[in-house]
Image (spheres, coloured by chain):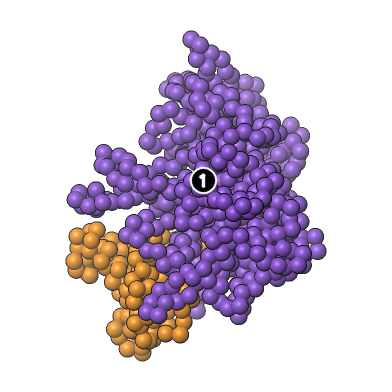
Chain colours: A purple, B orange
Amino acid sequence: MDEKRIEENLNKLKDLIPVNYQLKESLKKRFKRNKWTKIGIAITVAAAVLLMVFSFGIKNLQDNLITKVNAEELKIINQISFISLGRINAGKIAEYNGTIYVPLYDKGIYKYDNKSFEKIINKAAGEVAVSPDGKKLVFITTESDGKNAIYIKDLNNGKENKIIESNDSNTYYSDAVFSPDGNNVIYTEQVIVPRKTHGFEVKESNINAVDLKNLKVTKLADGCCGSFVKNADAIVFERDNKIIYKNLKDGSEKIIDEGKRPSVSPNGYYIAYEKYELKKEKIEDKDVRVNVNNIWIADTSSLTTKKQVTLNVPKSIPPGIPKEEIQNYVTSTLYTYYWPVWSSDSKSVFVLKNLNEDIRGNTMQLMKIELSREELTPEEVVKKFLQAIIVRDEDFARVLMKNPPTIMTVSNPHPVAYEILGSGTEDGKPYVDASLTYGYIMNGYCSVDKSRYYLSPDSNGYIIDSIKDLGTVEFIEKNGTFYKIENNVETKLFDRREIPKEILPDNLNIHAATLTYSPKTNTIFFTMQTDDRSQSRIISYDISHRAFKLIESLENTIIPDIKVDSSGKYLAVLAYNDISQQSNAYVYNLKTGEKVDLRSKFENTKIEEISPQFWQRDKLIFQISLKEGFLYYLYDPYKGQVLIP
Amino acid sequence: MEESFLEFYEKNFDDVYRYVYFKIGNKWDADDIVSEIFIKAYEKYKTIKSNPRSWLFSIAKNTITDHYRKNKNVTLEDDLSPFSYPDIFENKFETEAEIDCLKKSIYSLPKEEIEIINLKYFAGMTHREISQIVKKTEDAVKMKAFRIIQKLKNLVIKCLEG
């Protein structure tokens, strides 16, 4: 240990202080536009560090193509995102057929798919868009001489071609997207010049299109953030906080709504956009004004119907504001939703989501909102609800409830799996019975709560009216003895001396480390570890048959967490090798004993940490941590496949 | 001033943000304060003749003091210490013991010393820039910084030995 080492570690610590890059970008834009207002200062859009988060779609519902219906008739069938630590800062993403392209500003552009998270473009970029055939990307970068440029990358041969370059560093480009036929790129060109005294002025903001065959540029409108509309000679764009539809044949314009950053779906039917409304709300019995931000969708054809697709809630009021100032106080919403982008199949909208609260280390997420004409059935509503509870997506859980409680989730013990037990009607009212399993990392505790969810019809299908508790079963290990607790009655299951000697490690000093339970097979799974960490065993105990079984024996490994799937067929294990200091995630087939190492499923991806998160019924959601940040993946043990959620 | 404000902003935002976040300890206030700092800087930028970075960090320091004054009803600079420097580092799943000890050691330092650590290592400032903010000579800052590192080293060793 010397001074140099301390300095090195201080630099490491520096990297652990999260910077709010979203704030950086939004402030920068304001400086560029020079549009400061008092309100703007108070409600500065916040966000810190991004983590990538995705929704978990139901395949059978995805098959139900969105045919042309009014925007307001579309149902939100899923809208799930995670809250977790993360360090990725992303710009505007693009998606094609399940592959997501993520710009990480100065780090370059990455491809996120089922095999890797891999850098494919080295140039710094804050936005990317993909061509309608998925073969090309368009992105904007700043050259070393300070000039700004638009590039096209051919994904087949890897070539990057500059199609537009500014004459000087005062000309900025943004919002580049392909036309539906792929022959043009529409983009915003802004000339921003310094003023004589101080500040900057946006001299011009043009929406241009460049023909990719001859690189001829045509100006289409004044404003920003334009998109072409498929099967119509028209564009949709933003000007002065209004979403405008412009007919390119006769030049006529029609205002669709107040909003920002419109994005037209690839099929040309819908426009997704950000909307900010100043509303009066009552928070903690105080009347305050809230700048409410949500994502909306509107039709391109009739331009008449609109639908809000996110549900935002106001932030609480920070302490220390004098009473007399409350009436002038403007707060923002708990989340900021921005940069909506359509999936290539026009069935989902991707949205960046920031948590505007002080939750350390993380707040940015990528959320996928799935839309459909079909309504959710009561069972699907309950599934979505439990899934939202598990991933702690309170806002979506609230959407599914009639009278959501103030506090909904807890941190430890935390829910790790759910199972639908049955459904029916009671006095004509539909209900669904389900269990929710809670786990406690590094602790011999597990509980299963059974509940009945009563539902009533709602615009999205069904909504949860009330929840009735049907009882809880707990499993706990105390000093080497395992108990089951039901209706406050504690029953001893077994103690450590009853475990067959051949199963246990040779070393006498052992302790139990973690515990989980499968309601389906009435089996508990637990780990025993020697105190010197040299030996670990994963063991199952079939309660009905009073039978022990050794699942795995690992050396120099700590097992902080095990999770069984809802069928009781697969066990996910987080294992830390004490020597290599490496985390591994394994999935065991409990019938055949086959073991899958999830690390081995990745190519060209340097994984720092890997950990199973929870079972989405029979699929495991797990997280990998890279230098760039945290990502979620899904593992299907039946097919042996890794997918992106 | 040859550098445009946007260039200046781009170059300094991360350092200012880290400096403020480390001192304040929550994102909510850090966001507001950092916004306020850059708005002030934006308004006055053209009038600055030299050392824009020291000037910016002086604004940062004053804005933080104003923030505490407004919100905590405290007036004396010395009274600020109980409110500042909460542990703000992102937790990795398993923090290295050494880093962990370093964190603890930093928080055990007097607040002027933490300030120097913050300015030098988290905000990436030079000794000269720091000297202008803390109103000391460059050599004094250099010596002070070196002593703090020695002190931290001893604290970390002690911490690692348990």
Q: Quadrant of the C terminus of chain A?
A: top right
Counting from the top left corner in percent of width and height, residue A1 is at 50, 75
Which sits in the foreground, A31 or B14?
A: A31
Q: Chain of mark 1?
A: A
Query: Dividing the picture into quarters, in which one does residue B142 lie?
Result: bottom left
Q: Secondary structure at mark 1?
A: strand
Q: Is residue B106 above or below residue A235?
A: below
Which sits in the foreground, A452 or A472?
A: A452
Which sits in the foreground, A500 or A64?
A: A64
Amino acid identity at mark 1 = Ile
Counting from the top left corner in percent of width and height, residue B16 is at 41, 70
Counting from the top left corner in percent of width and height, residue B143 is at 37, 86
Which sits in the foreground, B89 or A334?
A: A334
Residue underneath mark 1:
A256
- Name the residue located 35 percent from the left edge and 44 percent from the top edge: A279
In this image, B17 relative to A69: left or right?
left
Q: Is residue A478 above or below residue B9?
A: above
- Name the residue located 70 percent from the left edge and 46 percent from the top edge: A231
- Name the residue located 32 percent from the left edge and 51 percent from the top edge: A330
> Local crowd at mark 1 within 10 Å, few (<14), some, or many (≥20)?
many
Q: Is residue A569 above or below residue A194?
A: above
Query: Can residue A607 be seen in the rendering of this structure?
Result: no
- Name the residue located 27 percent from the left edge and 68 percent from the top edge: B65
